[in-house]
Image: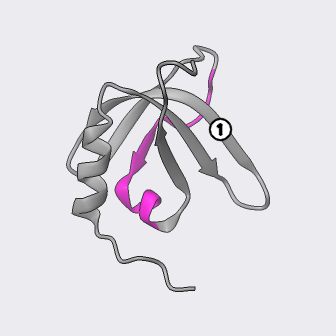
Amino acid sequence: MIKPTANISAVRRAVQECCHKPVTVKLDMGRNRRVTFHATVNGVYPSLFTVLPDDSRFLGKTAYSYSEILCGRVKLRPRDAAKT
């Protein structure tokens, strides 16, 4: 199946719309390891974005590049305020 064409600027705009809003982050870490956590998009910069996990004990990576979304390693989904 052919993936829809997207570019870095479209991904950057989509992440910027989620800035300071609650999201669900899904990470594909390879070899059947996946991590899902709730966070808030904290900062949007020219080459990366940062997230602030809701769990203060989270010890994972919290800065991601836009290319990781294009490759499918990181997925962001806006969280409903009613479901939290």
The quadrant of the image that shows the C terminus is top right
Q: Residue 4: which quarter of the image?
A: bottom left
Give left or right: position of 52 versus 49: right
> Viewer-proximal residue, 47 or 53?
53
- The answer to whether residue 1 of the structure is visible from this angle is yes
Q: Position of residue 79 (x, y in %)?
A: 49, 30
Residue at left offset 23%, top offset 42%: 45
Residue sitting at x 36%, y 26%: 21
Residue 60 forms part of the magenta stretch: yes
Q: Is residue 79 above or below residue 35?
A: above
Pick out the residue farthest to the front: 82
Identify which residue, 2 or 42, lies in the foreground: 2
* Image coordinates for residue 76, horizontal then vertical, percent: 47, 45
**Which image quadrant is residue 16 in?**
top left
Q: Is residue 10 above or below residue 34?
A: below
Q: Which residues are magenta?
A: 58-70
In this picture, is 72 found above or below 20? below
